Each structure stands twice: as C-alpha cells, then as structure tokens.
Amino acid sequence: MLLAMHGIRKRFGAVCALSGVDLRVLPGEVHALIGENGAGKSTLMKILAGVLSPDDGDMRLAGAPYHPTGPRGAQALGIAMIHQELNLADDLGVVENIVLGREPRRLGWFDRKAAVQRARVALARLGREELVDNKRIGDLGPGPRQLVEVARALTLDARIVVMDEPTSSLSQEDTEHLFAAITRLKQAGVSVIYISHFLEEVLRIADRYTVLRDGRSVHTGAVAQTSEPMLVRHMVGRAIDEVFPRVEHTPGPPLLSLSNVAGTRLPVNASLTLYRGEILGLFGLIGAGRSELLRVLYGLDPVRNGDVRVAHVAGRDAERAHDVPSPRATGTGVHGRAPWVRLAQGVGLLSENRKDEGLALTMTIADNLTLSHLSHGARFGFVSRAWQRERLRRWADVLAIRTGGPALDANAPVGTLSGGNQQKVALARLLDMDIHVLLLDEPTRGIDVGSKTEIYRLIGELAANGKAILFVSSYVPELLGVCDRIAVMHRGTLLPAAPVADLSEATLMTQATGGAKT
Amino acid sequence: MTTRMGLLASAVLCMAIGCSGPGADGRTGTGKQAPPSDQPQSPERSPAKEPPRTIAVIPKGTTHEFWKSVHAGANKAGREAGVTIAWKGPVREDDRAEQIKVVENFIAARVAGIVLAPLDDKALVPVVKDAIGEGIPVVIIDSDLSFAGRVSFVATDNHAGGAAAAQRLGTLLGGKGKVAMMRYQEGSASTMKREQGFLDALQKKFPEIEVVSSNQYGGATTETAYKTAENLLVRFGELDGIFCPNESTTFGMLRALQDAKRAGTVRFVGFDASSKLVEALGQGQIHGLAVQNPFAMGNLGVKALVDHLAGSPVDKRIDTGVEMITADNMGQPPMQALLSPDLDKWLK
Amino acid sequence: MAAGKRTQDSRLTTVSDRLVRMLKWLGPFLALALVIALFAGLAPDRFLSTYNLKTVATQTVIVGLGALGMTFVVISGGIDLSVGSLIALCSVITAVALRAGHGPMTAVLLGVSSGVLAGAVNGLLITGLRIVPFIVTLGTMGIARGLAKYLADEQKVDADALGLSGLMAKSPDPAWLLVAPGVWLLLGLAVISAVVLKRTVFGVHTFAIGSNEATAHLCGIRVNRTKVLIYALAGLFAGLAGVLQYCRLTVGDPTTALGKELDIIAAVVIGGGSLAGGSGGVLGSLIGAFLMAFLANGCTLTGVPNYVQEIIIGAIIVAAVAIDALRQHRDSP
C-alpha cells in the first residue's frame, strides 16, 4: 500500500465537501478517481497535495503518517499534481519550465547543461526526448505541454502523480502519447491517480478505480471486473439506460448560412448551412478553428472575409424588434456584427470557457442568468429583482439547477455552483432570450455524466422546438450520439457536413487529422 | 500617500518644550500639571489647575530655513509666556486646501489662539473668520490677509526695507551715479513693495542719482534672473550701482557680475541672505544685504497674541524690521544672530 | 461536524454564510465606529464637538465626491488617476468663468461639464485606443494638470465667489441645514449612486464588466459604450469636487488636490472595492472617505504626528484588502 487515506472529512462554510472518503493506492498502479462534478474529487486531491488540510481522517504514505505542510511539503514527499489549468510559463523553454524553481546552479549561476540533462532524462522516461529543444513553451500544443508538466513532476522524484482531467483538451494523438507516458511511469513504479470524466479512457488506462459520490467513496474495485454502465451506476447512484436520449426532431428551412467566412487568423474558409430544427456537429482537433468560427459568427472576433446570413424568423416577439438597429442587420455582415446585434437577431453563443468567459463567477446566479437581457425586465433603466428571481425559478425547474443548500439562493455567487449547474445557468441565459440559432461550444466539458445526459436531452428538445443548433465538441461519441449531421474542421477549413449515419469515429478522426478528404 | 491633513505640532515636541526644565532665561514653565506661577499674563484666565494654553503657529511650509527661524522665535516667545506652541503647516508652499485644513483642525482642537502665515490673501479668509467666530483670535505673520478682523499683522515692512537699501546704495555712491534695479516678478506683493520703497527713497534722498533701468524682471528662478542680469550688464556698460529685491535676483546678478569680471567694481546691494551671498559680501563683491528677521516674526507674532489674550492692546501692524548687513558689521553678534541664528536652542 | 443532519447543518451554515457576508459589508462601518470611539475616548470634548463634526464632514466632501465616481470605475475593473488633476482643472475653470463675469450658475455648469467632458475623453481613449486605464489616466493626469496651470496662467485665479463659498461654509445659511450644503450634496449623490449601482441596468453592467469583461462581451453588453459612460460619470463627480474645491478655497488653484487621486482610490479600497474589479460599493467608499478624514482629524486633535497617521492609513488599506483576501480564500473550496 503506497497511499492510504481513511475517513477524510472536509467542509467549507455551508458546503460539506467530503464526509468520509477512503482511498487506497498501490505502488505502480494507475488508480482512477471518478465521480460526478461536486462529488469531492478536487477537494480530495487538494488535501493530498497539501493545499487543504482535512477536518478529520487519517493519511499514510508508504506506511508512515502523512501530514503535508503545504504544497511544497507534499511535493517533497513525492506527491505531484498535474493541474487542469496548466501552470507553465509560456515565454520560457521546455528545459526552463521543467526545472523552474529548482534550477541547478553552479557557483550561483544557472547551470544550463545540468538543467538540459535533467530535463532530457525526465522527457526520455515519457518517450518524448525531442521536446527538450523547444525554446518557447507557448508555441507547443496542449498535448506536449501536458507532458512537460508530467516531466516536471518526474524531476521531483514523484511517487504519486495526480492528473486532473488530463485529456479534456487533448487531441486523439496527444492522448495516445499521454497514455504511452503513463504506461512508462507505471513500469517505473510510479503510481498515477487519474481523474477523468471519460469512462472509456478510465477503462483503458486504469488498473483500479474509486468512485466518489456526494463526498463519500461509494465503490472501489479493479477495472478489469467492471464496465461503463456499472461505473455510471455507481457515479450517479441510478442506472442510466441511455446516455444519449433521442428526441425526435425534423429539420426545416435554413436559419444560418455562411459562405467562405474567414477570420483574421482562423477560420480560413468556412461555408455552411444550418437548418431550423437541426443539430449540426462540428468536430476537429484543438486549434483547428472550431471555436474561432463560432466567435466570428457571433461577432466576438472580426470577420475578415465572407458572408454570414441570419434568416429572419417570423413570430419573434415584436417587443424586441426595436433592438435591431437597422434592416441590414438581418442580412449580410461582412465586417462582423457585435454580439448584441447577433443576440437581437436571435443568435446566441455558449462559451467553451465557462470560468473565464461564460460566466461572471463573482456575480449572483440571478444576474448571470439575465445579464444579456436585463433591459427586458427593466423599467426606466431599473432592474426588476422580482423578474430576475422569477426567471431563475422557471429555469431552475426546467433544467433542474441545484445548489448545496435546501433552496436555490438567487443572490449566491454563481461560482458557488458545481460545474454542471454553472453550465445550466449559462445555457438558461440563452434559452431565456428569444434565441433561434444556438452556437454551443463544448457544452458538456467538465460536466458529470448525469448533467451531460440532461444537456443532451435538452439539446434534442430544443431542436424539436425548431431551434437550430451548432454543436462543437472534441468528444466524438457525443457528436455521433446527438447530432444529425457533422462537419469537420481541419486547419481552419470547414469540410462539408455529412449525415451521422455515414460517419464513424474513425472517419471523423481521419478527416480531422487531414488523412483523407471525403 | 495619504491625507496630509494638518496636524498639531507633535505632542512630544510640546511636552519636551514644557518639560525642558529651566530655560536660558530661567522662566520656563515646569510641566503641564503645574503652570508657571510667574506667568505674567492674565492670571484670572488661567486658574492654577489648568494646563498651559496652546497657541498654534501655522507657517506656509515646513521645509525652508526661513520657517525654522520663525518656529524658533515662536518657541522662545512661548516659553517666556508659559504657553505651548503647536507648530504645523502644509508640506508644499502652494497647498492652500491643506493649510485650510490645518487651521480647521486647530479650531476644532480649541487652541487659545492662532498665528498664521497665510498662503493666500483670499483663500484663507473664510476659515480665519470661522476661527474668530469660534472665539479664537488670529495674528497674521509674513504676508497679509485681506481681512480686517485679524488681531495684528506682524511682518517685515518691505517698503522700509527697500528704503534702507536705497539709503545704503546712495551713501556708497556719494549721491551720484547711474543705478539699475532688477525687479523680481510681476504680481509678487512683497518684492514690489521693496522695489517701490527703493525707488521712492532714492528719489527723495538722492535726487542726483539716475535710475537707468527699473523695468526688467528677473523672474521666478535663479536661472531666469541670471539671464536677465547678463542682458542688463551688456546693455549698460557703465553702471555705478545695482539693487535686487530678493535672494534669487541678487544671486543671479552676482553670478552675472562675476562672469563679466565686474563684481566689486559696481556697488551692489541685495535683499535676503544665503551662504553664497554672505561669502560674496565678505569678498567685497556685494556691498550690502537687507535681511529680514524671521525669528522676530515668530517671536513677535506669538507675543502679540499673548498680549491680546491678556487683554492688552496690540498694534494692528508690527514691523519686524530689516537689518542692513555689510562687510563691516557682519561680524557683530546681532548680525551673526540674523545670518546664522542658533535655532537649535529653541527648537529642541 | 456530525453527519446525518445535513439539512440542518446547511441551514445553519447558510446563516453563518450570511453573517460572513454581512461582516464584510459591516467591516468599514466597524472600522469607522472604532476610530470614532477611540478618539472620542481620547479627546471627548473636542472630537465630538459640533464644530469638529461639521469640520470633518466638510473636509470629506472633496475626497468623498471623487470616491463616488471612482467606485464605478473601480467596480468596472478600471482606475482613474486623473481625478486629482481634474479637480484642479475644474476649479480653475469655475474661477476663470467667474472672473470673466459669468454668473455663478454658468460657472458651476462650466466647471462640472468640463469634468464630464474630460472623463468622457478618458473613456474614449481607453476604449478607442485599447490602452489600459492606468496608462491613459496617467497621461490625462498630466494633461489636465498642465491645462489647469495654462488656464490659470500658472497662478491662482482670483474671482469673486458670488456667494458660491456658502456651499462649503461650515456654518451654513440657513442654519437649519446644520452642515455645509456641499455635505448634503455628497450624501444625496451617494444615495443616488448607490441606487444606480445596485438597481439599474447600467449598474449591473458595470459590475459585469468588472467581474468578467469577456462575459460582458459575450452577453451582448455594449462594453465600450458603458465604459465611456462610467468614466464620464467619474468626470462628473470630479467636476463637482472641483467646483466645491473652488468654493472652499475661493480662488482657482491649479496646484490643488495634488495626489488626491490616491486618497480617493484608498477610500474606495477601504470601502471594499477591489482593483481587480467586480466588487465595491458606494456606501463602503463613503465610509472609507469618512474613515480617513476622521482618522486624520483625530490624530491632529490628539497630537499624533503626521507620519503616524500616514502609517495607520496605509496599514488600514493593507488590512482591508487582506481581510477580504482571507475571506475569499476561506470561502473557496
């Protein structure tokens, strides 16, 4: 037994984050830690890494009592964290980043030779020695950057490496590299605690797993003796027969059409027609320009070239018609349109980056829900709090938005909600307006399985109600499970969309990596 | 930086003065519990148990040497009268708002009286009115306030100072010759009075002396005064005497004379003193310096206030005098006291 | 904590959560009460005298008005370093207008509207050139100061105040006003600002921009337009402060309020404003301004030297920010 955590408890003010968690990690194993968002995984790992101290419970590392005094203490004892948000200095090279804070010195000077040697050894253990030549880490993609973090952990003589959602921003290829590296670590006797929402990955890479639910460890076992449905059942506490519920919907007339749209850098060229009542998937590797396309469409980034048309939808409530500044607004917009114009036209964007863009985390739930259309509930410029609460109650019912407390507190900061509930608030903001074209950028990223399914169902229902949905995702199974058609973006160029029936994970990956054009 | 709201002079300072034991004159108060029994002023106003009264002295600024002399003079008068002197002023000499706050806070602190060197003849009027409304008398020092309600105005008589300079220069020249006066700056009341006093006295007492130039302004800094002086010297190749109305113009003129190798040959009378000017006086390059008496300004300002509080009549205008310092008298003790006063004795 | 009573627990903790939030809100009040109690204990007759209270109230007006505008700016995630210079500029403009023979109303309007204009210029430069507010207002700080000196011919501007000085008279006419009309103006504008900030679309948008500008863009808020409005509003308050500074000095002084922007920012920060944006409040800023005025006044009355007072205020600023940071650290899992 390398690590034994027993009966760990921790609470933050109102929230009881952990109420009795056991976790046992063997030497040289990959141990998956799974659970819905808010189950307590991050808190548990922060305790392990010495960032937080537990209120109660017992921890032993290799038999000895383990009481880390802060993150540095934990590091010294061989615990390394690879964070979801990578902690790398963009302007430094790979070598500098790997030795950052523990630079080898000779006579007080930075000993570059020793640093390179140390970095080379660490990278070699991951099978990516060639990265040592990189001079500026900001130029690397997310996959190699992740590996640099791991290499950095290795130079610390880590006995346990904690990886928190390491693949959520990685392409298939980078994921493979990461898995290869994990296998090497395992062979070297290093244990890996692997946190992920992707259950297929867990089944593939992990040896054993522990499931957390509501701040407790509910199940632990060997991966070889389980299956995806079983894991899901442990996680959500109920069986989910279908992860991708189908809601019948039929495409209608076109609502949004792009011809040869180009942004300042990305996208390079995108043409597309999106129909009413249709879910169109958009796939591609990180950096292919999918998010950029949505941003250009929505007016967050300028359009350099091309034509975006938003069809006028009859029956939009007349009250809002005056928001549209000119008749041209419903037509073409070569120079791009500001977001407020797009919103007035019925086009809304759900950001992929919930924390940095999607929500104002320090503002209240009610404010976040109504931020884009405050004036709808305002009289003489005064915001109606009653109206805000009423809207929140409605969407909390429809989307099942939940907080830790017994009742939903409209005035609590939205940052106090779990990731899934935050995403529902961001989505509710769009739905609360008269939006007909929904641009959804990674709507299920970092969300637990239960919430994902709810969002899939919601997307289906929206399509059935005549909305047009552009669904960007890096997760092929959900695209195949939810969409009517899928288009792949490769290096800024949008390839023609094809019906889901004609596609498979393999064909999508081929297109995305530029292997062959259909 | 935080609010530089005005403050009382530190209690520490006041206590130190109060507790410094027998002063040079042996009349100093013995501490705050027991006010001096020999205090001559209005014994009926200060019953035995009352701590010494406080008089606030507010300068235009706190950094210049001039104000240190004022402070020393005020402390001397304070010790002699058995009152505590609270010394506080704005840091910058153009911070009117700050000086108003200082006065306000002294009013709130219920000081017995205020001695004020106003930064502005108008801006300080409302707050001085406030003080008088609250029963706190105000003596104005250094430059005047356009408000008649003050107890007294204690300052150099600049007109007389200018006249003294004229007297010196006229005597030196034997009542004949060509004289130039380089003015300081438009709108500066004190120097304009000196210039006028000089011209008036010259015309009256030495009518044969010809003033060849009196319309050139040296400007605010030594730099500008230097340039103007150079131009003047070029224009008037033959000059017998020169007068400058303040330190910067005097120094600028001195530098120009030195450059032109005419220092010592032209009779030169200046105003105010600095170590460079005193040095030139010793070397015979300057022949007279009219020097104000800031020590007396602080001293007489406080005395006037103490007298007023005691119910004695006080003159509305008190002249602190101007001394003419020359190479001959600069060694004498009274002049030395003006040129390098022993301030430490009164500031400790 | 005992498990099994989760609902009760969470109800309890919601209460304690509210308490924490209330404490944060109350913090500046408590500090102010503490300062007043301290000095009232040290010098009761002087510190609590009517005259002294009137004095402190009047002394707070200039910084207080500046802090109202700065509250909006800071909440939106910006900063305005030009406010001290704008106060000087507007006071000079008021004086120049009076000297040129205009009536008091015209002069006040000119003073205030030049503040609005200068503020709008700040906003336009920030949004138009996409330069950070710190740099833009650092520049306009110098420009406004220079303009003030130019307009004043590098001297103070004498002009008959035509009764305007009554606005800042500690003993007001009529006497039932109790304090200077300027104090009432400050309090009235504070109430209006608080309502605008908390209740209007503009106020919520201000918070949104400061909380997360990207979100504000995403939500279709017209960020640039709102920012220009915010800086113009700050200019309005600076203009008013400038006019009142003239009323107090009765001369237009181009060198006045030098460094005042830092006092104003300090008031906002003590009152709970975060320079990262997204938090702050009018009431807090006002309390911050009063706190600093009371502290300075109390130190003077009790004979504490200048430098001690500067150290204390510096410590309070650090403490205010540190307490907030600690609270946030504790709150976040």
Image: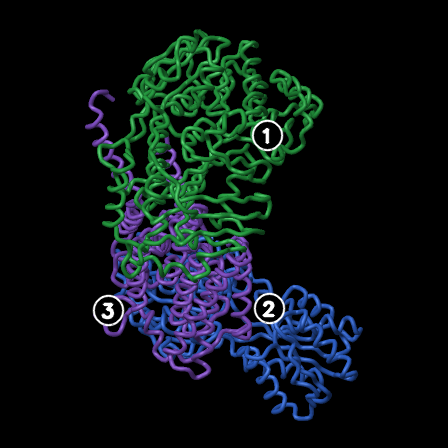
Chain colours: A green, B blue, C purple
Question: Is residue B17 among what the camera can see?
Answer: no
Residue C151: x and y in percent read 53, 74
Question: As drawn, is A10 to the left or to the right of A1?
Answer: left
Mark 1 vs mark 2, foreground winner is: 1
Mark on residue B335?
2
Label 1 element class: loop
- The quadrant of the picture occupied by the C terminus of chain A is top right
Residue B169: x and y in percent read 67, 82
Mark on residue C177?
3
- Measured along the vertical axis of the image, is residue B233 above or below residue B281? below
Residue identified by numbered label 1: A513
- Camera-side residue: B304 or A335? A335
Mark 2 vs mark 3, foreground winner is: 3
- Judging from the image, mark 3 belongs to the subunit labelled C
Q: Real-space Cα distance between discs 3 and 1?
A: 78 Å
- Camera-side residue: C191 or B245? C191
- Camera-side residue: A173 or B309? A173
Q: Callout 2 environment at 10 Å: few (<14), some (14 to 19), or many (20+)?
A: some
Mark 3 vs mark 1, foreground winner is: 1
Q: Callout 1 environment at 10 Å: few (<14), some (14 to 19), or many (20+)?
A: some
Amino acid of disc 2:
Met
